Amino acid sequence: MSSAFKDYLQKHNYSNFDMKAVLFDMDGVLYDSMKYHAKAWKAVMDEEGLDSTYEEYFMHEGRVGYSTIDLVIQRNKGRHATEEEKQRIYKRKSELFAIFNDGELIPYAYDLLKAVKGKGLQCIVVTGSGQPSLLDNLDNNFPGIFNRNQMVTAFDVKNGKPHPEPYLMGLEKGGHLKANQAIVVENAPMGIEAAVAAGLFTVAINTGPLDEKVLWDGGADIVLPSMEALFRNWESYANELSL
């Protein structure tokens, strides 16, 4: 067994993995959509006269939208966002995202999902997104992979990433799983922090503009440059996980 897997087991006092599921983030892992989320966030904040940068939204990825709005307003106005501001800004951001987004999938995402299912594992989405246009497309884009009752979205949690609640809920929806019965595939620093805080082995794929050091610093057990790299390594990892 390679050092990353052995180190995880030793750190968490497990004798082995007992794999039942793989928990997948959505934006930047299944859909090449983060660039459009960032573009939409920047555009709506510009409309509101609020200073922000395109790049910062890659760091905020995984937060629920209202939390992102609150952070930007706190920085710009020195106060928390009102409920009216949160709802209005998020509604407009969603409209812009629907205009910008082209629905492009991350290359090799479906190949990996089928390979995971081929090992008899559940595939569970754990996303900070509440974007209906993406959630509704999962069945069309990845037929036969996901069970809608097992998805964790922004509508399901009180505390978004980097809080561990989304991934702890993912374990629950997978059948009250323990942390050594699943691994996580993430691309965002806050998502990685959430998965690590939930005690899960975390594979990070660097599909955005961030330096991979940010993903390591978030606590990822493995960092890869693409979903293709994960797909190419899946059989090796499956052996490590005793599948």
Image (spheres, helix red, strand yellow):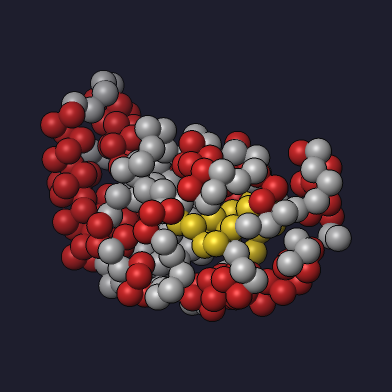
Residue 176 visible: yes
**Residue 17, image x, y percentages:** 75, 53
Image-quadrant location for residue 115: bottom right
**Of 187 and 49, which appears nearest the observer?**
187
Quadrant occupied by the N terminus: bottom right
Q: Is residue 111 left or right of residue 97?
A: right
Taking the spot 43% from the left edge, 74% from the top edge, the residue there is: 144
Q: Is residue 156 left or right of residue 21?
A: left
Q: Is residue 166 left or right of residue 91?
A: right
Q: In the rendered view, tell whether residue 235 sits above or below residue 18.
A: below
Q: In the rendered view, tell whether residue 6 sits above or below residue 35.
A: above
**Of 229 and 74, which appears nearest the observer?**
229
Taking the spot 52% from the left edge, 62% from the top edge, the residue there is: 123
Q: In the rendered view, tell whether residue 141 sits above or below residue 215.
A: below
**Residue 151, image x, y percentages:** 41, 53
Q: In the rendered view, tell whether residue 210 sits above or below residue 116.
A: above
- Give the number of callouts: 0
Q: Residue furthest top?
A: 79
Residue 127 visible: no
**Residue 120, image x, y percentages:** 61, 68
Q: Is residue 171 left or right of residue 65?
A: right
